[in-house]
Image (spheres, helix red, strand yellow):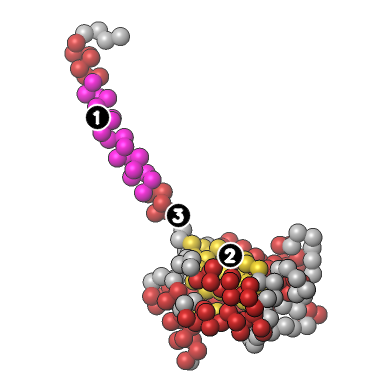
Amino acid sequence: MYKNASDWHCWRRVTRFLARTLPLFLLLSVISACQSVAPVVKVGLVAPFEGRHRDVGYDVLYSARLAVREINAAGGVDGTRVALVALDDSGNPEFARATANSLLIDPAVVAVVGHWLPETTETAAPLYTEGNLALFPGGEEPFAAIDPATLPPKFIEAYEDVTPFDETPGPYAKPAYDAFQMLFQTFAAAQEVNGQINRQSVHAALEEASDR
């Protein structure tokens, strides 16, 4: 294989050099790849996906998917992508408390849209306040139910496009969509002022907006 001892020693030097430099090269490649991945924040959506109020839950779920899909397709909020975490509380205050606690223990969840019924929102709201997790109270003003007949055709078309069976939007579809749009505006304000989107910056941005 080797013509002489000189060739063998040369090959040994090459292999030793590669053994030392390749792991470093691979490490730098991994770091570079990680740095190129856009940051992600999670948004909780809590609604009754089971039980007698399930129509409300799916009405808001499709709007949430539509809003998240649109913001991510546009590059996210200043480069930060949004992930939706949808949880069912079945319209039950006890379940609402449990879902609120499960969102609170995940630090990547920076805001919640829910719970769409007065009794479940009332139960969960103090928990979010205590945990400094911003709540956009779905089902209450300015996100209360509206007449679906007033919805613009473009919204209806976009909504039906994200549903599995071309369901039509109900009274909570547009309020849910509007809640997420306000949420994204709050994220942008938090990013601009604090340089990042987390629970503290989102909460601060909401407080600043309410003081205006």
Residue at image point 28% right, 30% down: 19
Which residue was labeled with disc 1? Answer: 17
Q: Quadrant of residue 165?
A: bottom right
Circle 2: residue type: Val
**Pointer 2 or 1: first along the chain:** 1
**Pointer 1 or 3: first along the chain:** 1
Which residue was labeled with disc 3? Answer: 37
Instruction: Please say whether residue 136 is one of the residues in the magenta stretch.
Output: no
Q: Main secondary structure of the magenta part?
A: helix
Which residue was labeled with disc 2? Answer: 85
171 vs 6, left or right, is: right
Residue at image point 25% right, 24% down: 14
Assign the N terminus to one quadrant of the image.
Answer: top left
Question: Which residue is most to the front?
Answer: 94
Question: Cβ–Cβ below 8 Å for labels 3 and 2?
Answer: no
Question: Cβ–Cβ below 8 Å for labels 1 and 3?
Answer: no
Percent coordinates x, y for residue 116 in the rendering: 67, 79
How packed mark 1 is, by other alpha carbons closer than 10 Å (few <14, some 14-19, many 20 or more), is: few
Q: Is residue 111 visible?
A: yes
Percent coordinates x, y for residue 21 in the rendering: 27, 35
**Pointer 3 or 2: first along the chain:** 3
How packed mark 3 is, by other alpha carbons closer than 10 Å (few <14, some 14-19, many 20 or more), is: few
